[in-house]
Amino acid sequence: MVTRAKEAAQTGRQIIIFPEGTRRPPGAAPDYKPGAVALYLKLGLNCLPVALNSGVFWPRRKFLRYPGRIVVEILPVIEAGLKRQEFSQRLESAIETATERLVNEGR
């Protein structure tokens, strides 16, 4: 994954990754995978976190979709160069705080 992402970054492409790998039910405990941290550390690029509330209207592992307004919020950039633990904490805190607020507003 890191090799392919590095190649993409060198050609000016953006890299989009869902740090948990998949959706989870709103309110469920976060389960961040190591891939986002690995990319951040190996590529030396800034990270632009994004929060969304799609789980309220598009439940995981269900065919049903419910009417509502999905909100995508672009969060402040996390600059390159942080240590693993600090980046991981900042990423999770930023996304979880914003997602919780969006989910509560969407209900």
Image (cartoon, rainbow, N blue to C red):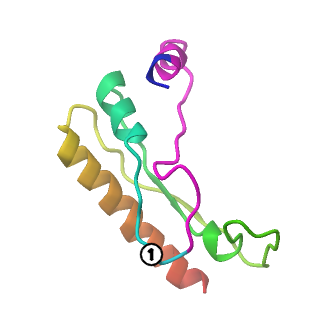
In the image, what residue occupies the spot 62% across and 70% down? 55
Left or right, 99 with reference to 62: left
Residue ID for mark 1 = 100
Left or right, 89 with reference to 91: left
Q: Nearer the viewer, residue 74 or 30?
A: 30
Q: Nearer the viewer, residue 29 or 66?
A: 29
The correct choice, above or below, for 72 with respect to 14 in the image is below
State the extent of the magenta-drawn residues as a range: 4-25
Alpha-carbon neighbours of circle 1 within 10 Å: few (<14), some, or many (≥20)? Answer: some
Residue 29 quadrant: bottom left
User: Is residue 22 within the magenta segment?
Assistant: yes
Type of the residue with mark 1: Glu
User: Is residue 61 within the magenta segment?
Assistant: no
For this orientation, the residue located farthest to the bottom is 107
x then y, percent, for residue 68 = 73, 78
x then y, percent, for residue 66 = 78, 78
The correct choice, above or below, for 24 with respect to 18 in the image is below
The correct choice, above or below, for 94 with respect to 66 in the image is above
* Callout 1: SS: helix
Q: Quadrant of the C terminus?
A: bottom right
x then y, percent, for residue 88 = 28, 48
In the image, what residue occupies the spot 53% across and 49% down? 21
Left or right, 2 with reference to 92: right
x then y, percent, for residue 64 = 82, 74
In the image, what residue occupies the spot 26% across and 53% down? 90
